[in-house]
Amino acid sequence: MLLVKAARDARVKAYAPYSQFKVGAAIRAASGAIYQGVNVENVAYPEGTCAEAGAIAAMVMGGETEIAEVAVIADSPSPVPPCGGCRQKLAEFAGKDVKVTLATLQGEVMETTVGALLPGAFGTGHMVSPSEDGM
Ligand code: THU
């Protein structure tokens, strides 16, 4: 699995001195290019960022805004699902059917989709006002 390997290769570069929990993420974008990301923690804990966010930032920097597939890996007893915020971040650039592979270093794999991870997602359609004055 190419994308899981890309996530695994990225993971070693994670900056996680506080949790010691290194996460790697990889996104295959519409062009076929692969973008990697890692979690980057901060001494002010809430300022840390997730691996998925890093991969998304790399993709946008690469000039792409369409996710075709995602993989996330961590050294965990079971495949680690993206946090709530990352689910919304992925949904910004991915259709409901986009495959998300969650993996452990030991080789356990769980496959899901962006739609399954974030049912009932808030989207642009919710901001279309049915009334004329927008009230
Ligand atoms: N983390 C990620 O990078 N992605 C996830 O999907 C789950 C959590 C990071 C955030 C933090 O640096 C560490 O894992 C522990 O929560």
Image: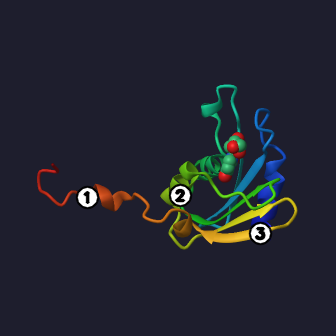
Q: Could you tell me residue 30's position as x and y percent?
A: 59, 67
Q: Are marks 1 and 3 in contact (CB under 8 Å)?
A: no
Q: Nearer the viewer, mark 2 or mark 3?
A: 3
What amino acid is at disc 2? Thr
Outermost residue toward the top in this view:
43
Outermost residue toward the right in this view:
106
Q: Which residue appears at 71% of the width and 38% of the height?
A: 40
Q: CA distance from mark 2 to mark 3?
A: 26 Å
Q: What's the coloring here?
A: rainbow
Q: Earlier in the sequence, mark 2 or mark 3?
A: 2
Category of crowding for the residue at label 1, using alpha-carbon neighbours closer than 10 angstroms: few (below 14), some (14–19), many (at least 20): few
Residue toward you, 65 or 104:
104
Category of crowding for the residue at label 3, using alpha-carbon neighbours closer than 10 angstroms: few (below 14), some (14–19), many (at least 20): some
Q: Could you tell me residue 48's position as x and y percent?
A: 65, 35
- Kindly indicate the quadrant of the structure image that contains residue 44: top right
Q: Is residue 39 visible?
A: no
Q: Which residue appears at 60% of the width and 51% of the height?
A: 83
Q: Which residue appears at 76% of the width and 33% of the height?
A: 18
Above or below residue 106? Residue 48 is above
Q: Earlier in the sequence, mark 1 or mark 2?
A: 2
Mark 3 within 8 Å of ligand 1, using the beta carbon: no
Label 1, on which residue? 128
Q: Could you tell me residue 53's position as x and y percent?
A: 61, 47
